[in-house]
Amino acid sequence: MSSIPLLKLENVFKIYKIDDLPVKALDGVDLVIKKGDFLSVMGPSGSGKSTLMHIAGCLDIPTSGKVILEGENVSSLGEKELAKIRSTKIGFVFQSFNLVPRMEAIDNVQLPLIYAGIKTAERERRATETLIALGLKERLHHFPNQLSGGEQQRVALARALVNRPAIILADEPTGNVDSHTAKEIMEILTKLNKEGNTLIIVTHDPEVAKWTKRIVKIKDGKIEN
Ligand SMILES: Nc1ncnc2c1ncn2[C@@H]1O[C@H](COP(=O)(O)OP(=O)(O)O)[C@@H](O)[C@H]1O
Ligand SMILES: [Mg+2]
């Protein structure tokens, strides 16, 4: 295994400005993620969890500090370069699934492959394979509103996985489902981690965090040790 961390945040600050008033969302965060990590980020509302995920996922850049992904400093890249990194290296899962309502499961899962420029037949093959691996063989041609919450989140997971990203980031992936479905989602995430995927999840729920290998607590934009 490589000794280079997969993702490293060094003294990361994120300061938003609202009407010229600064809001310090991240206040000097240091974090190292290694290949095969399975980590939960916990903290009260407004503590900076989503901001941390956005920066770790190259959706945004820090005000200061460094973000190093697979050895590359991504902290000051422009939007176009960040988009390219996101489409090849990061898989995102959201609380509200964020599936395209008028697209079948198989088409939702193909979206990242379209952005990556992969041809139709190969896209369909990979989307199908990924959905089947997540237990959705009988749901390939269902629309999101024909699926349960747990099934929708599995489609969203398939979409995050289909590009074989270096890292999967999930912001409250169990936030919109009942506790039974939350357990089902955590079982799947655990299986994906055992298969070698690196995962970071944000959660409010200690029952969810228990499934992960490591818990990081954040408060007022600072990681608590
Ligand atoms: N786009 C933004 N513009 C201004 N302030 C923001 C923005 N996003 C987040 N914040 C502020 O930064 C802080 C951290 O927010 P966030 O990362 O969303 O916390 P969490 O996900 O833990 O609830 C909060 O005070 C929030 O109001
Ligand atoms: Mg949040």
Image: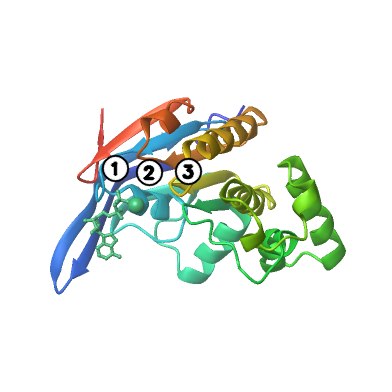
Q: Assign a secondary structure to mark 1.
A: strand
Tell me the kind of residue under disc 3: Thr
Disc number placed over residue 174 in the picture, else none = 3
Looking at mark 1, is its residue's CB closer than 8 Å to ligand 1?
no
Which residue is painted at 54% across and 34% down in the image? Answer: 186
Q: Image quadrant for the N terminus?
A: top right
Q: Assign a secondary structure to mark 3.
A: loop
Q: Which quarter of the figure has residue 64?
A: bottom left
Between 187 and 87, the one lying in front of the other is 187
Disc number placed over residue 9 in the picture, else none = 2
Q: How many marks?
A: 3
Question: Which numbered disc, 1 or 3, marks the residue that appears first in the sequence?
Answer: 1
Answer whether labels 1 and 3 touch (C-beta < 8 Å).
no
Answer whether labels 1 and 2 touch (C-beta < 8 Å).
yes
Which residue is painted at 19% across and 45% down in the image? Answer: 220
Mark 1 lies on residue: 29
Question: Which numbered disc, 3 or 2, marks the residue that appears first in the sequence?
Answer: 2
Tell me the kind of residue under disc 2: Leu
Q: Residue 20, percent across and down?
A: 14, 72
Whether residue 6 is visible to the viewer of this picture, yes or no, is: no
Which residue is painted at 59% across and 46% down in the image? Answer: 150
Disc number placed over residue 55 in the picture, else none = none
**Marks 1 and 2, how far apart in space?**
7 Å
